[in-house]
């Protein structure tokens, strides 16, 4: 059983001093004698006393802490964004408190309450895929806490206390599908996520417009809405195998779903990319390790994290920053190259 951490009151009681005297001694206040300071510091060392930095910050009226809320920390993208956030926050003199919603809007609400109760100075958030009601974010705005959305952005939610940074999901999808068409693919399937998230709506529109730009009409049977997981990709592949005519390419809205589908189709004897080419989205670490290596759209995760903190810092300075849309990069690998 862990031992309770020594408090300021414990020091004061043991030494027979007031808590205020102990506090001033630890702060090296000139009104406290050197002998008393020595006694206080010696006992603090013996008991392993650590000051409550949060309480001290609250007394000063500043916590210098930013709240971060992510849907999950699986894979490569969100950890990369968080790394960018933490790096830029440290450069600007902020600490970071991170929570994850696990794609659950109720957990998202509880996390926001926790961050608000901790009196963070601003919040950076990527919304859960089950979020439709925005009342909990409206409450953050009502209390005057600056809010920056990243990657998964609430469309239409904006005022002088909020901003956003995202990737151009439409452009990323448009380039991915245009690349498949340039490789000679014509029946291109799209594995898409729930339309409640703007990222999936934009990626689907990019898919449709890329086909139309080159004179092709999308077959509705080739668009399958799934959970963006490996199991979701595998289930989508089973649906594609049941179609009268197989697709000759798959564009998936995440890399993990692309790999789930690719594994199933390969098990059924289809060759990648000769029979079915594959493109994912996010540029996860494993995309260079699959067989063949997976073509993917890079989302510039670390840059997104740094930019989100910069936007929040501008809000804290009383500025009204314009939302930023980063440009994606298509990383072509063997899963789409047909020679």
Image (spheres, rainbow, N blue to C red):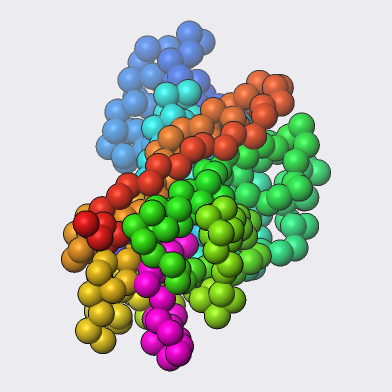
Q: Residue furthest top?
A: 30
The answer to whether 277 appears left or right of 131 in the picture is: left
In the image, 14 versus 109, the foreground residue is 109
* Residue 203 shows in the view: no
* Residue 203 coordinates in the image, percent (x, y): 55, 57
Q: Residue at x 32, y 72 (%)?
A: 276
Q: Residue at x 73, y 34 (%)?
A: 161
The answer to whether 291 appears left or right of 248 in the picture is: left
Q: Residue at x 26, y 67 (%)?
A: 273
* Residue 44 coordinates in the image, percent (x, y): 34, 33
Does residue 47 lie above or below 275 as drawn?
A: above
The answer to which quarter of the image holds residue 33 is: top left
Does residue 247 lie above or below 152 as drawn?
A: below
* Residue 51 coordinates in the image, percent (x, y): 44, 34
In the image, 285 versus 310, the foreground residue is 285
The answer to which quarter of the image holds residue 260 is: bottom left
Quarter holding the C terminus?
bottom left
The answer to whether 301 appears left or right of 138 in the picture is: left
Quarter holding the N terminus?
bottom left
* Numbered range of the magenta stretch: 235-255
């Amino acid at each position: 059983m862990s031992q309770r951490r020594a408090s300021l009151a414990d020091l004061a009681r043991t030494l027979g001093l007031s808590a205020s005297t102990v506090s001033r001694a630890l702060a090296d206040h000139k009104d406290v004698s050197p002998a008393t300071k020595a006694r206080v510091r010696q006992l603090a060392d013996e008991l392993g006393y650590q000051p409550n930095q949060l309480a001290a910050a609250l007394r000063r009226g500043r916590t210098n802490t930013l709240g971060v809320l992510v849907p999950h920390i699986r894979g490569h993208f969100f950890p990369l964004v968080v790394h960018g956030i933490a790096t830029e926050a440290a450069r600007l003199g902020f600490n970071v408190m991170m929570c994850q919603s696990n794609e659950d809007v109720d957990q998202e609400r509880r996390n926001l309450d926790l961050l608000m109760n901790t009196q963070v100075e601003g919040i950076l958030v990527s919304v859960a895929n089950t979020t439709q009601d925005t009342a909990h974010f409206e409450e953050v705005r009502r209390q005057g806490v600056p809010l920056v959305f990243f990657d998964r952005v609430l469309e239409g939610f904006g005022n002088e206390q909020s901003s956003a940074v995202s990737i151009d999901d439409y452009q990323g999808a448009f380039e991915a599908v245009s690349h498949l068409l340039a490789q000679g693919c014509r029946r291109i399937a799209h594995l898409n996520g729930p339309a409640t998230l703007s990222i999936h709506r934009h990626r689907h529109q990019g898919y449709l417009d890329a086909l139309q730009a080159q004179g092709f009409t999308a077959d509705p049977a080739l668009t399958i809405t799934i959970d963006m997981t490996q199991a979701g990709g595998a289930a989508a592949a089973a649906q594609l195998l049941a179609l009268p005519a197989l697709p000759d390419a798959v564009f998936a809205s995440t890399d993990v779903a692309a790999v789930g589908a690719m594994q199933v189709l390969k098990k059924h004897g289809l060759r990648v990319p000769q029979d079915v080419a594959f493109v994912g989205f996010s540029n996860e670490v494993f995309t260079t390790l699959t067989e063949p290596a997976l073509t993917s759209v890079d989302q510039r995760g670390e840059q997104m994290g740094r930019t989100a903190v910069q936007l929040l810092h501008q809000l804290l300075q009383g500025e009204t920053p314009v939302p930023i849309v980063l440009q994606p990069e298509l990383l072509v690998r063997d899963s789409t190259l047909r020679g």
